[in-house]
Every structure is written in C-alpha cells, then in structure tokens.
Image: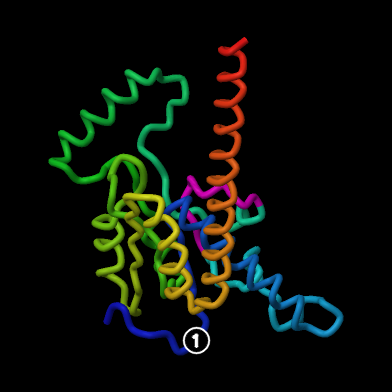
Amino acid sequence: KRNRPFSSTPRVVSLLPSATEIFAAIEEEQLRDGKKKAPGGGQSTDDASSSPSYNGMLVGRSHECDFPTYLGELPVLTSQAIQDTSLSSKEIDTQVRSSLSEASGSSPLYSIDEALLESLKPTVILTQDLCSVCSVDLAVVQRCIDKFAHPVRVVSLNPYSLDDVLASVLTVGEAISLQSEALTVHKDLRERLAYWSQTGKELAAVAALRNEDETVR
C-alpha cells in the first residue's frame, strides 16, 4: 500500500528542515506562477486553506522546521529528548552517546506524536536516513506509518554532495506533483551557483594580481 500515485492533492508532512525549505521554495514558485496566470495577478479563492501553506499541501512539520516563519502555525509532530539548553557541548555529546548505546543503535533522541501524525492523514512524508542524531530518521518514521490504515509515500532525502542537494529539489517536486515548479527552482539554484562560482574565481584572480603587484613594488 506504499508509494501509490496520487489521485488528489498530496497532504505533506516534513520531518526535515531542509526538506521543508525545499518544499517552500517550490510552493513559492507555484505562487509566482499562479499570480502570472490569474486575472489581475491575485490568488484565487480556490487556493484558500486553513493551512498556512499557500497550496494547503503542507499539513505538519518537525520541531526543527522553523523557516519560512509563516509555516510556524503548522502542527509540530516531533520532539527531542534532550531539552536542557544549559548543557555544554561535551555534556550533550555524553548524553547522546549514552542514549544511543542504551537503545542498541535505535533513535531515542527524537519522538513522533503518532496519534497526531495519523490524524493529519499525510500521503507524503519527507524525512532522511543519513543521521539518527541530527533528525528523526527513516526507521522511526517507518515504524509509525506501518500502523496506518491509509497509504503513505515516504521520501527519504540523503544528499552526500551539492549535486545531490540540488537533485533533492526535483525529488520533492515529483513527490508533491509540482515537477515544473521544481525544475524552475532547480534551474535558478544552478544559475546562482554558477554566477557566484565565476564571481569567486574573478575576485581571486584580482586578489592574486594585487598581491603580485605589491610584491614587485
């Protein structure tokens, strides 16, 4: 019952801050495109939703997903075991190592509100499987959705390089049926990276010439 194609608008839960920001970038591109197409450049009443998300797709988030700020009204589905903000880095590291050791490699550092998650009836969950210390991982999510009666597609983003990060934009776009908008965002990011890469090379060349000139003097 997993990974079925959608017959209606996806209901998305993001448990990964980077995935939430990718979703928001794609959604904002949809909004810009919608304004271009709509008479008078306005948002149609059909797009109205109780969700702060423009298209109403994003229905829940993790406790770490704090950008864009307008998504702060969404239900928070996760929490972390270590709440004491006064701990030093060494003390946090000790607690993390102890928790992981006691749990035989599982992830007790984060928990999911399973009842709330099921009540939101997500059809897509964005998560990761790179690090059980950094965020809720895939195994924890899978244990939750295995109990659900409705189908859920889990999209795990595991980038190892900058190219992988950019590819994640296309992955999210495909999962939420906004491939065209995702392609636009992907293209824009590529162009921005190319611009700043070239700018950096030019600035480095100028700096090298200045250093050479000062050395000659």
The image quadrant that residue 52 belongs to is bottom right
Q: Is residue 111 above or below residue 57?
A: above
- In front of the other: 79 or 130: 130
- In the rendered image, residue 138, in percent from the top left (x then y), is placed at 28, 57
Are there few (<14), some (14-19), or many (20+) residues within 10 Å of tag 1?
A: few
Q: Residue furthest right?
A: 40
Q: Residue furthest bottom?
A: 7
- In the rendered image, residue 3, in percent from the top left (x then y), is placed at 31, 78
- In the rendered image, residue 73, in percent from the top left (x then y), is placed at 62, 55
The image quadrant that residue 88 belongs to is top left
Q: Is residue 95 above or below residue 4?
A: above
Q: Residue at x 48, y 47 (%)?
A: 63
Residue occupied by mark 1: 8
Horizontal placement of 65 versus 81: left or right? right
Q: Residue furthest top?
A: 217
Q: Quadrant of the C terminus?
A: top right
Inspect the magenta stretch and tell me whether residue 65 lies in it.
yes
Q: Main secondary structure of the magenta part?
A: loop
- In the rendered image, residue 170, in percent from the top left (x then y), is placed at 45, 68
Please, which colouring scheme is shown? rainbow
Q: Residue at x 37, y 53 (%)?
A: 112
Horizontal placement of 193 versus 87: left or right? right
Q: Amino acid at mark 1?
A: Ser
Tag 1 secondary structure: loop
Inspect the magenta stretch and tell me whether residue 175 lies in it.
no
Q: Is residue 75 something that shows in the picture?
A: no
Q: Residue at x 50, y 61 (%)?
A: 60
Q: How many marks?
A: 1
- In front of the other: 66 or 208: 208
Q: Which residues are magenta?
A: 60-69
Q: Residue furthest front?
A: 216
